[in-house]
Image (tube, coloured by chain):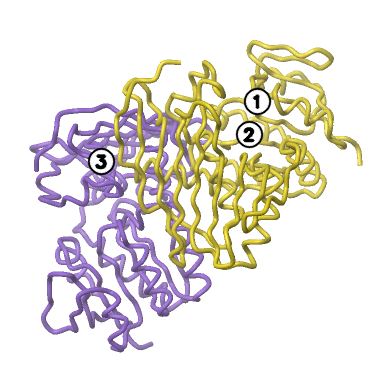
Chain colours: A purple, B yellow
Amino acid sequence: MSSIRLAIVGLGKIARDQHLGAIEATDGIDLVAVASRNAKLEGVHCFSDIHELLASGIEIDAISLCTPPQGRFEQAQAALLANKHVMLEKPPGATIAEVFALDQLAQKQGKSLFATWHSREAAAVEPARKLLSERKVRSVHVEWKEDVRHWHPGQAWIWEPGGLGVFDPGINALSIVTRIMPESFHLTASELSFPANRAAPIAANLTFASASGIAVTAEFDWRQTGPQTWDIRVETEEGPVVLTHGGSRLLVDGTAQIVEEDREYRNLYRHFVSLVNAGRSDTDFSPLVHVADAFMLGRRNVVEAFED
Amino acid sequence: MSSIRLAIVGLGKIARDQHLGAIEATDGIDLVAVASRNAKLEGVHCFSDIHELLASGIEIDAISLCTPPQGRFEQAQAALLANKHVMLEKPPGATIAEVFALDQLAQKQGKSLFATWHSREAAAVEPARKLLSERKVRSVHVEWKEDVRHWHPGQAWIWEPGGLGVFDPGINALSIVTRIMPESFHLTASELSFPANRAAPIAANLTFASASGIAVTAEFDWRQTGPQTWDIRVETEEGPVVLTHGGSRLLVDGTAQIVEEDREYRNLYRHFVSLVNAGRSDTDFSPLVHVADAFMLGRRNVVEAFED
């Protein structure tokens, strides 16, 4: 099967930190073009936006969207209408309605759509999922606390409506919990802390209940300095199952099981290649659904202004 | 076919104003029980809550939930697990995740689930839908302005997280627009006005775009005194199509077409009877999806405190 000719749209921090290297390391897919308002990349075709790219006539099979979620619908729609396969960075869009519409459009066009959740590719996630499917879960607690100044320096869009604020990292945790939990769950309470000068929350406290009544709680906070915390602790009748370091390490009943290097984005591109070759899509929007629910059901507190 | 034996859970304002009379007027369904914390009804079995109702052993086939959306999931889940058909007042739940879970549970149990949108049964809605499917729509504007003190006197739950505030009436407009529009649309901007002392918005300004770029705008406001406004104005290439009075009147190209008495809830129960008898469900959650999107994408303003 010939290699997928890929274009990246959006050449910001996430594209440079993760996507370019992962594409380089993945068989069956080659980067042939980029579209970016400001940046250029050597050795590939460069365009200023997706419309110029699509109008150029260069041959591409697929587009990976690494732009902020606001405005991504129009790009994904244009790509699908031009008969390109599409891979979406997380979160897959700014609204639930638009990602559902993209899913339907991809089906109609017969193209692959991949709504990626890179944290689901962390090394501990699949082993944890298997383990929990054989155990009796009592409760889940998520602690996802990081320093926004370190991870999102000067990214103004993240504080704007649609940028999701602390849910930008928090949705990673939700993408893991929705994958490893043996049953679905829904929000019952949400407390959101908004800086006085920002349109997006800097912290959130969430309480969910599963169908059988298991409590799932989550604390997201962007004000953590010093050591960062990305932990998911699952209490089971047989003992605790704990994912740390964003899902890359696993402790079962207190014993460390996995310490592996980060291969999240390489796994994503490998999966995208297999989806395209099989003519399938992978569009689980449940993490974004939980975030929308957290806003809809959220009680909001105003906290200290945040200056970047 | 024998009549459906129905129980109502929640005997508040909407049940008394609308449901009881509609059930009485509908063939094929009979009210045999109610569950209400505080109220009783003559001539039927009375229970204090759904669990007491289900444990009582009296024979019922279906349950209509008229309680506030917060906490309705547990009631609907209990009803479906007890093999009862379920009808949900609008909004169908407090979160998107929970209504998706109910939909799956109903399928698994082989029971009918009906997520009702009473405004879709207003007289002008179906004629408008047919008309717009044959016309070229240019834009849609919704003006939904009413006096909350008149329509929701002392209903504290409506101002709490999950009560949706002005989206409680606004979702009625969205239920009509999602039904009559020939294509799907998604939110692109949302401005929400929160009273300083309340957890839910008193006004909202929404901008949506359809897949083909049609602008759909909506103004919701709960501070309107005097004449109330529940209008949807659709500009088409062939002339304006206007629904007024909450969808009960239709003007086409300036000429009044329909002035009909309100049969919304009778139509809902008739539809529920046909769903149960056919073994089908009717679960379009798109109006609630748009509301969740409006909160997630919302820019919030704080406005004057609201006292009931």
Which residue position is annotated with label 1? B14
Residue A202 placement (x, y as % from top left):
22, 37
Which residue position is annotated with label 3? A200
Is residue A131 among the parts visible in the rendering? no
Is residue B22 among the parts visible in the rendering? yes
- For disc 1, the neighbor class at 10 Å (few under 14, some 14 to 19, many from 20) is few
User: Is B11 in front, or is B261?
Assistant: B261
Left or right: A296 in relation to B275: left
Residue A198 placement (x, y as % from top left):
20, 39
Q: Earlier in the sequence, mark 2 or mark 1?
A: 1
Question: Residue B233, relative to residue A281: is it above or below?
Answer: above
Q: Amino acid at mark 1?
A: Ile
- In the rendered structure, the residue with mark 3 lies on which chain? A
- For disc 3, the neighbor class at 10 Å (few under 14, some 14 to 19, many from 20) is many
Q: Nearer the viewer, mark 3 or mark 1?
A: 1
Q: Are marks 3 and 2 in contact (CB under 8 Å)?
A: no
Mark drawn on residue B89: 2
Mark drawn on residue B256: none
Q: Are marks 2 and 1 in contact (CB under 8 Å)?
A: yes
- Tell me whether marks 3 and 2 sit on the same chain: no
- In the rendered structure, the residue with mark 2 lies on which chain? B
Compute the Cα span from label 3 to label 2. Answer: 31 Å
